[in-house]
Amino acid sequence: MNKNGLLYEGKAKKIYQTDDQDVLWIEYKDDATAFNGEKKDKIAGKSRLNNLITSQIFQSLKEAGINNHFIENLSDTEQLVRKVTIIPLEVVVRNVAAGSLSKRLGLEEGIQLNTTIVELYYKDDALGDPLINEDHIRLLDIASPEQLEIMKTNALKVNEFLLELFKEINVRLVDFKLEFGVTESGEVLLADEISPDTCRLWDMETNQKFDKDLFRRNLGSLTEGYEEILTRLGGTSNV
Ligand code: C5P
């Protein structure tokens, strides 16, 4: 498989075409951004950590029967995935109050939610990725009701799987964000990444943070936190 032309460059990844029109080559970048690009930095080693953690989680999800775009890991910072057209929605699943939920509803961070919350955000930088509901999605024709149902059902399945996976390594899965895409044949597939960039992950005993809040809130070394997750997942650490 050859890496061909650059198709798209996002905040955290570059996406290239390959010889196979149904396969894309993803290269993770060391760039860190937060607050819709207002806070920016380059963090050496972040690309490797997010690529290796995402590859491992997507492979495990596949083995558990939760279909996704992942094909194979190519190197420390690269992976092959199936080509999909991303549906411009961020599906956020929450188990514990934190971040924007705490702010919006006045809930103390760290409170266990008595029901799992699924939220939908419209992926639009110019609008600041607003929280939207299913009426808005219908109005803007962002996804069909059937596609939305698949996304929500799969998001809850991913949550069940990840809660267990992280519990085994003594990590509390506070919340996370998923993205889905549509294949050429119309199948809705889990895509993008699942990493400490897109999840809140706290130590089960101490509530120490191992996720992007380290960067967002200047709480300490991002790479040390992410490396801790990779190591606990059984991946290789070079520290
Ligand atoms: O900021 P908020 O509390 O809404 O984030 C909820 C979860 O979604 C967090 O785990 C955060 O890392 C993730 N997220 C993301 N990308 C965004 C917004 C949120 O990965 N653009």
Image (cartoon, rainbow, N blue to C red):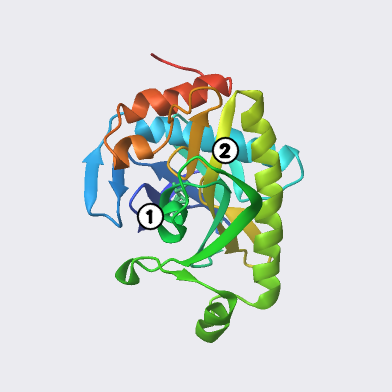
On the question of residue 73 being in view, the answer is: no
Across and down, in percent, residue 147 comes to 66, 70
Q: Amino acid at mark 1?
A: Gly
Q: CA distance from mark 2 to mark 1?
A: 37 Å
Q: Are marks 2 and 1 in contact (CB under 8 Å)?
A: no
Please identify the quarter of the rendering in which residue 215 is found: top left
Residue named by callout 2? 173
Sequence-wise, the earlier of marks 2 and 1 is: 1
Q: Which residue is identified by label 1?
A: 5
- Of badges 2 and 1, the one in the foreground is 2
Frontmost residue, 213 versus 229: 213
* Residue at the image position 43 percent from the left and 31 percent from the top: 209
Asked whether mark 2 lies closer than 8 Å to ligand 1, one says no
The residue shown at (50%, 26%) is 229
Residue at 51 percent of width and 47 percent of height: 97
Residue 32, position as x, y percentages in the image:
30, 42
Image quadrant in which the C terminus is located: top left
Q: Residue 237, can we see it?
A: yes
Q: Is residue 130 left or right of residue 152?
A: left
Secondary structure at numbered mark 1: strand
Tell me how many marks there are. 2
